[in-house]
Image (tube, rainbow, N blue to C red):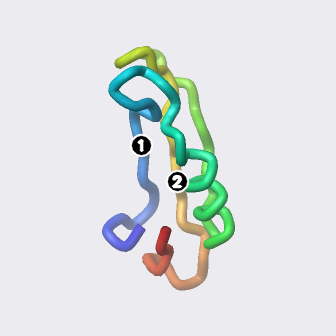
């Protein structure tokens, strides 16, 4: 979050085998605990059997200080 003004988008949310990233839920939890808004959004395209992305916004007063 230190290198962005507003948001980060992560796509795809799967590994090379097309399985959901194992640590994704923990990552989302850590981001929320550090003052971020995290949304998983469907996208109108597919890559490696993935069709959703993670959209992360830093809502903390000290922008850029989120560490995961």
User: Where's residue 4, x and y in %?
Assistant: 36, 64
Q: Pointers 2 and 1 in contact (CB under 8 A)?
A: yes
Distance from disc 2 to disc 1, alpha carbons, whole Å, reads 8 Å
Dot 2 falls on a residue whose secondary structure is: strand
Quadrant for the N terminus, please. bottom left
Label 2 Cα crowd, 10 Å radius (few <14 / some 14-19 / many 20+):
many
Asked if 1 appears above or below 45 in the picture, the reply is below
Give the residue at x 53% y 47%: 23
Horizontal side of residue 11 vs 23, given as left or right: left
Asked if 47 appears above or below 2 in the picture, the reply is above
N-term mark: 2 or 1: 1
- Nearest the eye: 8 or 50: 50
Res 6 quadrant in image: bottom left
Give the residue at x 41% y 43%: 10
User: Where's residue 17, x and y in %?
Assistant: 38, 21
Res 47 quadrant in image: top left
Horizontal side of residue 56 vs 1, given as left or right: right
Dot 1 falls on a residue whose secondary structure is: strand
Give the residue at x 50% y 74%: 66
What is the count of numbered marks? 2
Asked if 14 appears above or below 25 in the picture, the reply is above
Label 1 Cα crowd, 10 Å radius (few <14 / some 14-19 / many 20+):
few
Give the residue at x 31% y 68%: 3
User: Where's residue 61, x and y in %?
Assistant: 59, 82
Asked if 3 appears above or below 64 in the picture, the reply is above
Q: Which mark is residue 10?
A: 1
Q: To which residue does mark 2 refer?
A: 56
Horizontal side of residue 34 vs 5, given as left or right: right
């Amino acid at each position: 979050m230190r290198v962005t003004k507003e948001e980060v988008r992560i796509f795809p949310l799967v590994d090379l085998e097309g399985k959901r990233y194992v640590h994704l839920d923990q990552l989302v939890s850590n981001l929320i605990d550090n003052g971020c808004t995290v949304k998983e959004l469907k996208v109108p395209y597919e890559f490696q059997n993935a069709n959703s992305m993670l959209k992360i916004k830093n809502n903390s007063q000290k922008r850029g200080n989120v560490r995961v």
